[in-house]
Image (cartoon, rainbow, N blue to C red):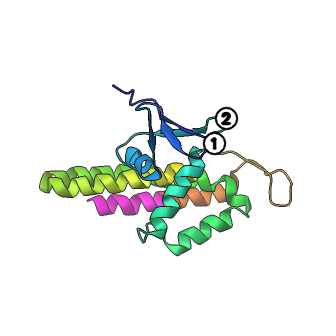
Amino acid sequence: MANQEKPLLIKRYASRRLYNTETSDYVTLEDIAGFIRDGRDVQIVDLKSGDDLTRQYLLQIVAEHESKGESVLPINVLTDLVRSYTTQATSTVPQFLAQTFDMFRDSQSKWVEGMGQVNPNLAKSFEAMQAQQEAFLKAMTSGVPMGSTGPMPDGRPEAASGGDDLDDIKKQLAELQAKLSRMGN
């Protein structure tokens, strides 16, 4: 039996084929998305270089779902994400997204538990949606330590996040949490 606590190791060969090391067979991006939907963490590494390619493949899975009309991300969110790569907000965006999704997941879990008592089939649908959201979150924030800082677009070192920007984010998170709490009641 596979160890569910360790990430499932997928190796990418030079031919770009993806190999599941637990089952000793080749897998597709859709298979990997299925593992994630089932609650399994994955790690994808290049066989030759050992480079971690997980983020790249998770983003590719998200992009394929979005292009098939399974849109989860509104245009304004995508636009803001693109903007965040060119502003000093780059270091705070991953932390903000992680905290927002954590609060959303908590509220959603409570709501699903309540709905599961009313209609078990509805709860299963929401659990699948929650797994997709977790995959998106991992794709957007993996590899970026929380609260990390980096250079500004002009090359100057960025000051540690804090001050007004962090206070604004905390306020927005509190407001979002309050809204989610009201929705769950």
Mark closer to the observer (1, 2): 1
* Residue nearest the observer in this picture, 148 or 40: 40
Q: How far, Cα to Cα, is label 1 from label 2? A: 7 Å
Residue 144 appears in which quarter of the rendering? top right
Q: Point out residue 59 in the picture as x, y percentages from the top left corner.
A: 55, 55
Can residue 133 be seen here? The reply is yes
Quarter placement of the C terminus: bottom left
Residue 37 is a magenta residue: no
Tell me which segment is drawn in magenta: 174-185
Residue 4 at x, y = what percent? 38, 31
Compare residues 165 and 47 and report the one nearer the observer: 47
- Give the camera-side residue of 167 and 48: 48
- Contact, mark 1 vs mark 2 (Cβ under 8 Å): yes
Name the residue beneath numbered marker 1. 14
Amino acid identity at mark 2: Lys
Q: Is residue 131 left or right of residue 118?
A: right
**Residue 48 image label:** 2
Residue ranking furthest to the bottom: 75
The N terminus sits in image quarter: top left
- The residue under the point 34% across, 44% down is 38
Whichever of callouts 1 and 2 sits on the residue coming sooner in the sequence is 1
Residue sitting at the far left: 118
Question: What main secondary structure does the magenta stretch of the protein show?
Answer: helix
Identify the secondary structure beneath mark 2. Answer: loop
Outermost residue toward the front in this view = 15
Find residue 51 and report its horizontal and vertical position in percent.
66, 38
Residue 175 on image: x %, y %: 46, 62
Please give the name of the residue rendered at 40% of the width and 60% of the height, measured from the top-left corner: 178
Q: Amino acid at mark 1?
A: Ala
